[in-house]
Every structure is written in structure tokens, then in C-alpha cells.
Amino acid sequence: MKASPNTSLKKQIPSSSISALFAMFAIATTTTDAALSLLVDFGKSALTTDTGSGTRWNDVSTTSNNVNIPNPMIANAIDVNGVLTGITLNETSAATSPANYGIAGADFNSSTSTVYPLSSTRDSMYVVAGATIALTLGGLNDSLLYELTLFSAHPSQSRTAEWEIDTVAQSLPLLNNTSNTIIFTDINSVGGEIEILFRGISGDANWSTLELTSVPEPSSTALLGLGGLALMLRRRR
């Protein structure tokens, strides 16, 4: 009597096990560890954005305008939920000649943004035309990729700001800007740091907000699911 194919001569994996494994595979392809997200507002202390509730901000501010930037700017940044991240922001190179830069306290009421709150965009940090300042984000994870989104505007003057990261430069016209941003994607930190160069290339340049996010990684549970699926399929062969 001949044996029926695929029954007595081969080990069968229970259908319930296969279903469970493919469910784990589905989780693995959709589940990620939570991504980091933090926001920075440059401006004077009378126009700060963080309220202590809701979406949290890191305010880099001074009590008056046209004064040098505090350093460190941020000693331990909070994320949008108010959780300390260990991330720092420092001025690591003063503006080149002409060395005129700092916090701009002007209240640009018409610099409304469709991207960020008015309180974060109506004042800014500035650097004069021809000058460059270097800021460094520290305390980052070199195994992650980061994305930086930068915004600024000016209500009455035709100015252009430029930012540079790892030899890649992008510029932004500021006059009456409400929604355009500069976005740097897939940035690797080196030694836990990312350096940002900021300069004015057409008139003085303003910089209102910085948003840092990390690219999510697959969660550990998801990776275990993938590992279990691969092991079971290998045994099946």
C-alpha cells in the first residue's frame, strides 16, 4: 500500500503554527520602536513657545534682541512629550567676519506659518549677510538615521538663508514665507554629533525653528517574529 504524498513521508507544520508565524511576520513589517521627535524655537524670552503642556518645545531665548546666543543653547533637550532625551545643542563656531549674529527679538506678527505655531516663527536667531555660524547637535545615536526640518520667514525684506550639513547645502527665500521648509533626510551622526552650518547669502538671515526626528527602527518584538518565521521555514525544508 502506497503512502499518500505529503502526509506520512513529510513532517507537516500545523496550520495554526503557520498562521501564528505569518501574523508575527505582519507585525514585523508594520511595528516599529517609537521615533524621537523634538522641536526648538529660537527667539527672545517674551515670545517663547513651550507652555509646559501639549506639544513641548525647547526655547533658545534671551531677554532682549540683538544679543549673543546663550551657550550651551540646550543642555538636555526634551522631546515633544516633555521627556528628557540627553540631546544637546551648542554653538561650536562663532560667526565668521562680519561677526554680527544673535537672537532677533523683532516681533514679526505677519510671519505666520502654516507649519508651526506663531509664537515660534515671529522671532528668530539671525546672522548677517556673509557670516556663518556652526551649531552642533550632540548626544545622538550613531546607529540611527535622522531628519532635520528647518523653518524661517521675514515679513518685509527679501532675504535668503542657507543651511549646510555634511557638505550638502540648501537655501530658503524668507520673504513672506508661510509653508516652505528645508528638510535634510537620512543624516548619520558621527560620534553622536551632527554639525549644522547657518549663513546669510542674500541679506541677513533668520532662523526660527528646528525640528529633529529619528527614522524608526523595527521593534525588538517584530525582529523576534521574523527570526521565528525564518527558523520554522528552514526546519520545514
Image (cartoon, rainbow, N blue to C red):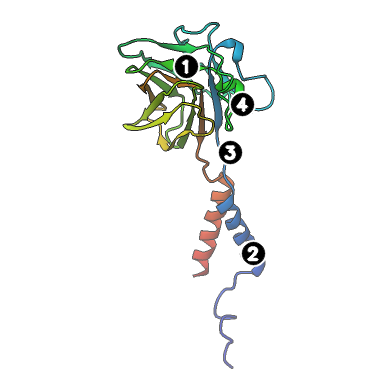
Residue type at the position of mark 4:
Pro
Write down the residue under mark 4. 117
Q: Quadrant of residue 129?
A: top left
Give the label, 3 or 1, closer to the camera. 1
Give the class, few, some or many, for how many residues have Cα within 10 Å of label 4's Cα (few <14, many ≥20).
few
Give the label, 1 or 2, closer to the camera. 1
> 50 left or right of 131?
right
Q: Which mark is residue 145?
A: none
Could you tell me if the residues under marks 1 and 4 are in contact, i.e. CB atoms within 8 Å? no
Q: Which mark is residue 125?
A: 1
Instruction: Pick whichever of labels 1 and 4 is earlier in the sequence.
Output: 4
Q: Secondary structure at mark 3?
A: loop
Q: Secondary structure at mark 4?
A: loop
> 155 left or right of 82?
left
Q: Which mark is residue 19?
A: 2
Q: In 3D space, how far apart are the residues under numbered discs 3 and 1 (Cα atoms)? A: 31 Å
Q: In 3D space, how far apart are the residues under numbered discs 4 and 3 (Cα atoms)? A: 24 Å
Instruction: Pick whichever of labels 1 and 2 is earlier in the sequence.
Output: 2
